[in-house]
Amino acid sequence: MPLPAMPLTVDAREHGLVGDGTADDRPALQTLVDALGEARAADGRPRIIRVPAGRYVIRDRPVLWRSGVSLIGAGRGATCFALCNPGNPTGPVPLAWFTAAQHGAGRDNHLADIAFAHFEVDGSGARTEEYDPLAKGLGLQYVLRGRFTDLYVHDTAATGFGCDFLQDTVVEGVLAERCGAQDPGGKRGGAGIGIGIGGWGGVERLTVSACTATGNGTNGIFVELQQEHWPPPRGIRIVACHAEDNRFGISDWGADGLLVTSSTMIGNHEAGFDVSSQGTAGVGGRGGIVTGCVVDGNVRDGVGLGNTPGPYALRGNRISGNGRYGYWQHDLAGGDREPASDIVLESNDIRGNALDGVRFDAGLREVSLLGNRISGNGRRAAPAATGGGAGVRFAPLSMTDENADWAPDAHRGKRLTVGGRTAVVTSNTATELALAPVRPGARTAWADGTPAPGSAYRLPEAPAPRAGLTADAPVVRPHLHGNRVRDDRRPRTQTHALWITRDAIWTGGRVTDNDFGGNASAATRFDTAPTGGRWRDNDG
């Protein structure tokens, strides 16, 4: 049959794919993709491969993708592509790839008019001898007019959905679970959904919507600038997504004006939402807006911003129940360490976090806190505790001491020590501690096995002060207006509304019409006195 006469839609089974979970379907799929790619190049008409229900094995080598060829399955759990590399233990095996380094992908050599939809990628059978960031589920670069819909990607060695430079593209309904299985932490990649940005220039029109990322080695969902000299691109949106039990939930590692809305970031190990320079280019995000999100119950911080020149705005979010700070301004070594300008926290509900509701550990200029409710923080208020013997027992994700009488959540964020083992407390009742998994995707808090019943344990003393807002760095011309920074709980655990530490410098600005009353110790604590500015009409 002449190539231009190839039908617009083909059935994979009619072109050699077996789908029995045993036969290697990669050669037949590669032949079909090449044939359809040639047909599309000849007549300009995109083609579709429809893949019936079955388990299709992709063995030892990935499929090199072609422009204008789409892959459509029969649904998650029905059509599954199983990746494995028994004959190539040093090589990554994504289902489909097309990259700059391996294939010369670029703006003038891109994939256009492609769709991947309604199937599963099982990466559990593909492991490399050493961690390889290319060991993804999908690994495409320079895509124009792409659509990735209703995909389930899980248990890959590196990032699950790892596609870069997506122009005029939608990523929707992707579920990424337990990806980055070989990432020991801190390596490149290892995310559920990781999207490299910057290849198309100053604007990349990309929407990520209704995606879920759980138990992934680094980020649940993140965008990452790929070259330091590239301009951080605008045009990227993350909407109505869920990130849980990842190292970081949703991260901005180099975009300009990233918009994150209506998303949930819960139970992540380092931070629910993260801005920093940890990415490949060493460039932090800037100009972003986070609004209408729930950032709750993360093991350490709710929101962490670092290495950004600003601006950044968080409006109308609930930032609650996190194991350390609700909002943490900080800088990492190696990135931009200049004071961030024009950070805005407006109308957020920042409550019930273990230590400070808001903490500034890096310099800020023109920071604005407007109309926030910063209440009931400092929950990590319980004194040191020890125990053991009768009534003490351990489970994979909990410890119970029937003789205890702890205040609810008063040990949140503490490190429980049992012999030489440690685990982090995420919440507690009067007699039981809930513990964080030892790493994302794990089902136990114990790296070396669950302790024996009756084993002796200890919990450290609570730190103090624990303020609604703490400044421990230079803050120049801040604007605090209309905030309610108090503690209405019984007993109160938020010791102060505002604490300026001995290492802080608070200069100028306006602090007006705030409610600083009703905290456990006092309205304010100034280890360093603020200088200049206007302070007036603050209750408490």
Image (cartoon, grey):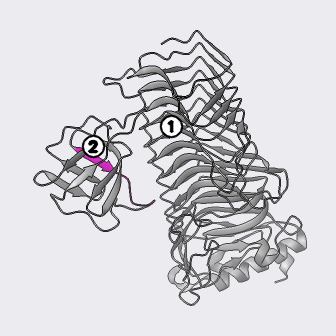
The answer to whether residue 16 shows anywhere in this view is no
Residue drawn at point x = 18 percent, y = 55 percent: 393
Circle 2 sits on which residue? 384
The answer to which of 115 and 303 lies nearer the viewer is 303
For the point 74% across and 74% down, the residue is 65
Query: In this picture, which residue range is highlighted in magenta?
Result: 432-440
167 left or right, relative to 212: right
> For residue 139, which quarter of the picture?
bottom right
Determine whether the residue tagged by mark 2 lies in a helix, strand or loop: loop
Query: Which circle, 1 or 2, is nearer the viewer?
Result: 2
Quarter that holds the N terminus: bottom right
Say if mark 1 contacts mark 2, CB within 8 Å.
Answer: no
The residue that label 1 is drawn on is 326
> Which structural element holds mark 1?
loop
Q: Residue at x 43, y 31 (%)?
A: 377
* Residue 282, image quadrant: bottom right
Where is residue 310? Give x, y as percent.
73, 39
User: Residue 407 location, x and y as percent?
Assistant: 26, 34
Q: Amino acid at mark 1?
A: Gly
Q: Residue furthest top?
A: 537
Q: Position of residue 109 (x, y in %)?
A: 86, 69
Report crowding for label 2: few under 14, some 14 to 19, many 20 or more residues within 10 A (C-alpha): few
Q: CA distance from mark 1 to mark 2?
A: 23 Å
**Mark 1 Cα-neighbour bin, 10 Å: few <14, some 14–19, many ≥20:** many
